[in-house]
Amino acid sequence: MYELAKAIPDVEVLLALEPEDLGAKLLFLLRKRPLQGNKFMPEQLNAELWPQSYLPGQQTVYPSDRRHEVDVALTEAWAWLQAQALIVPAADSNGRYGWLILSRRAKRFESEAEFARYTVARMLPKDALHPRIASTVWMAFMRGEFDSAAFQAMKAVEVFVREASGLGDSVIGVKLMREAFRDNGPLADMSAEAGERVGRMELFAGAIGSYKNPHSHRDVDLNDPVEAIEIILLSNHLLRIVDARAAAQRGAA
């Protein structure tokens, strides 16, 4: 793929890219290139980088002694694209002979920024999230509304604790967490060691106090999706704990 050498002329930069990052670059270069019958073979595209039969007049951009490393990196990137169903075997008989096409999913991405959001969102699998946040929080995250997603996740924890504890609307935030998980509180596990009980109460109180208010994220950059994921996964863990305490409460009744 001769366009790649123009987009990334430094071989060290190319080799430093993770498969998903290099794959994204290949994907959008493919989308700009006219493909014969909309199909391609990765091996043929790789060969364009080297002065062989495909482009005999082209000068080598990458050092020839790095060819094996470059070919491995490209192979990893193509494999990643296939694993994500972004490139797939041609639907007709050509697919049996190694010809690939861009998938419907690949054609939906309008920009590299949109694709970057997609790759990050895959770090937050929807089916791993608690049902209370699996839809709304995940969708907010997918839209790039990271601050809102983190707030909604922590708000879900507060709502669930209120429901499970039966403490009502008069107690909110940190105070609600302390009331619910204090010794002999409605969600306290009195079979646990005293230090664990205090730790769990402080875990809930600290999380709500630090992250529920969307204006209180002083120590994190919620333009960064990774930071938002960490807060969402913390919320997810807290929701699982409330699930377990609510189940134990029902079993004791």
Image: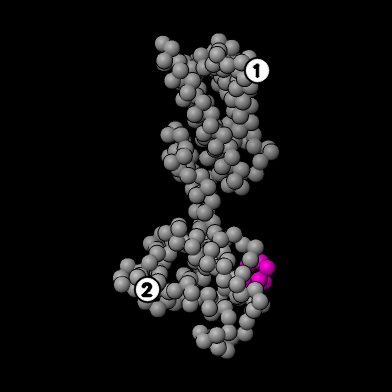
**One can see residue 17 in this view:** yes
Residue 236 at x, y percent in the picture: 51, 34
- Does residue 224 lie above or below 210 as drawn? below
Q: How many C-alpha atoms fall within 10 Å of the one at disc 1: few (<14), some, or many (≥20)?
A: few
Residue 51 placement: quadrant: bottom right
Disc 1 residue type (three-letter): Gly
Q: Earlier in the sequence, mark 2 or mark 1?
A: 2
- Furthest residue to the left? 92
Horizontal side, residue 186 vs residue 16: left or right: left
**Magenta stretch contains residue 10:** yes
The part of the chain drawn in magenta is 7-14
- Does residue 154 lie above or below 194 as drawn? below
The residue beneath circle 1 is 195
Q: How many C-alpha atoms fall within 10 Å of the one at disc 2: few (<14), some, or many (≥20)?
A: few
- Furthest residue to the bottom? 57
Horizontal side, residue 247 vs residue 92: left or right: right
Question: Which one is in front, 32 or 14?
Answer: 14
Residue 17 placement: quadrant: bottom right
**One can see residue 157 in this view:** no
Residue shown at 62% from the left, 85% from the top: 59
Residue 40 at x, y percent in the picture: 43, 74
